[in-house]
Image: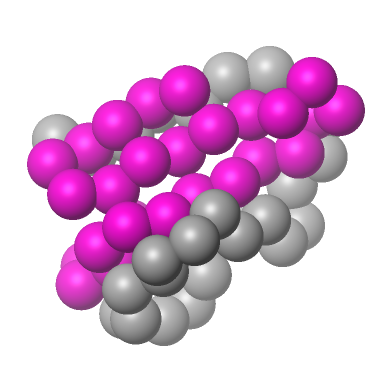
Amino acid sequence: MSVGTRHSLAVRSDGTAWAWGSNRQGQLGDGTDHTQRTPAQMEGLSGVEALAGTP
């Protein structure tokens, strides 16, 4: 799991990546700037081993 100032990223054991929190600068990578209040799978990523957020 990785955390930024107002967002979090996580990798599940199946290699999928999930993100939630503030998205004002597009830090969740979903192409929007909308806050995500619950974990949402990051599309287009598979076999993920680690993630790093921006501070």
48 inside magenta stretch: no
Residue 28 x/y as whole percent:
42, 58
| Horizontal arrangement in the rendering, residue 43 relative to residue 52 (left or right) | right
- Indicate whether 20 appears above or below 1: below
The answer to whether residue 26 of the structure is visible from this angle is no
Q: Quadrant of residue 50?
A: top right
| Horizontal arrangement in the rendering, residue 21 relative to residue 44 (left or right) | left
Q: Nearer the viewer, residue 36 or 52?
A: 36
- Indicate whether 34 appears above or below 41: below
Q: Quadrant of residue 11?
A: top right
The quadrant in which the C terminus is found is top left
Q: Quadrant of residue 15?
A: top right
Q: Nearer the viewer, residue 6 or 46?
A: 6
| Horizontal arrangement in the rendering, residue 9 relative to residue 34 (left or right) | right
Q: How is the image coloured?
A: one colour
The answer to whether residue 49 of the structure is visible from this angle is yes
Residue reaching furthest to the front: 38
Q: Which residues are magenta?
A: 1-27
Residue 43 x/y as whole percent:
72, 61
Residue 26 x/y as whole percent:
32, 67
At horizontal 49% and vertical 61% (from top left) the residue drawn is 38
Residue 27 x/y as whole percent:
33, 57
At horizontal 54% and vertical 54% (from top left) the residue drawn is 39
At horizontal 32% and vertical 57% (from top left) the residue drawn is 21
